[in-house]
Amino acid sequence: MMSSVFTSKISKFDAKKLSDNLGITYKNRNLSTLIKQINNALKIDFKGKSADVTEENIQARARGIFLMALANKEKGVVLSTSNKSESAVGYSTLYGDMVGAYAPIKDIPKTMVYQLAKYINKNQEIIPERIITRAPSAELRDNQKDQDSLPDYETLDKVIDLYIEKNKSINEIIKAGFQPIIVKKIVKLILSSEFKRRQSPPGPKVTTKAFGRDRRYPITNNYLG
């Protein structure tokens, strides 16, 4: 558990409970000092510039440094936590939470992650219920929610499925009942995030069309206009 000033008490509590339920080692390290040191080192370069996603990404990248250091020292590997929904639209930080040697849920959409969590809890609560029901958040700024930046995951995953796996066009997806502005936003994010996916760790193929195995897209072109 790599805490920052934005990490909620709820997240810490649920992470500890999950670790106890799984019988795995739990460590809580506050990275606020490290994050602050990085920001201070950039003060001169950022002078006169407002805080934005840059500072959010610094937090994720500080965690990447910490995880990779532990893996090196312990002769282990880091598992990337990105799922297919996040990978599709680039909702992850390059050299941050994307670090790792293997990505076990790389080809699993977010909605399927929730289904798997509920299945795991079928007979007893292993994953704390609040982890499943609580609004997802990267906790990189105050009161941040995934849906501040993305459509709800039900909509997002349906559009990703139609566009990637069913190979439907933008117009066909809109005719299927989705709002044009949402479809165009999602498709633009998918196309512009290919450079991130090329640098992501490998993972298993689960769906009919996995990124990196069944679908590759040019990263140097003028298709986006």
Image (cartoon, helix red, strand yellow):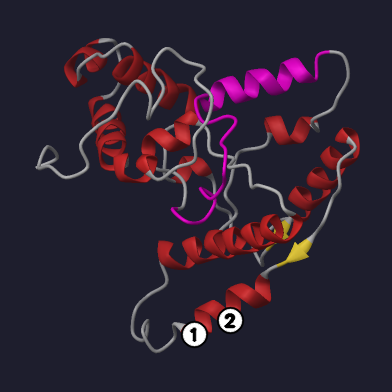
What percent of the width, then of the height, locates residue 128?
81, 33
Q: Amino acid at mark 1?
A: Ala
Indicate whether 90 appears above or below 162: below
| Alpha carbon distance from label 2 to label 1 | 6 Å
Given residues 22 and 7, the one toward you in this image is 22
Residue at mark 2: 37
Question: Is residue 106 magenta-colored?
Answer: yes
What percent of the width, then of the height, locates residue 14?
80, 43
Residue at mark 1: 41
> Are there few (<14), some (14-19), or many (20+) residues within 10 Å of tag 1?
few
Indicate whether 13 appears above or below 189: below
Q: Amino acid at mark 2?
A: Gln
**Which residues are the magenta region?**
94-122
Question: Is residue 198 magenta-colored?
Answer: no
User: Could you say whether the residue bearing mark 1 is in a helix, strand or loop?
Assistant: helix
What percent of the width, then of the height, locates residue 211?
38, 28
Name the quadrant of the C terminus: top left
> Are there few (<14), some (14-19), or many (20+) residues within 10 Å of tag 2?
few
Residue at image coords 56%, 36%: 103
What percent of the width, then of the height, locates residue 164?
32, 20
Instruction: Kindly tell me whether residue 201 is visible in this rendering.
Output: yes
Q: Farthest residue in the bottom direction?
A: 44
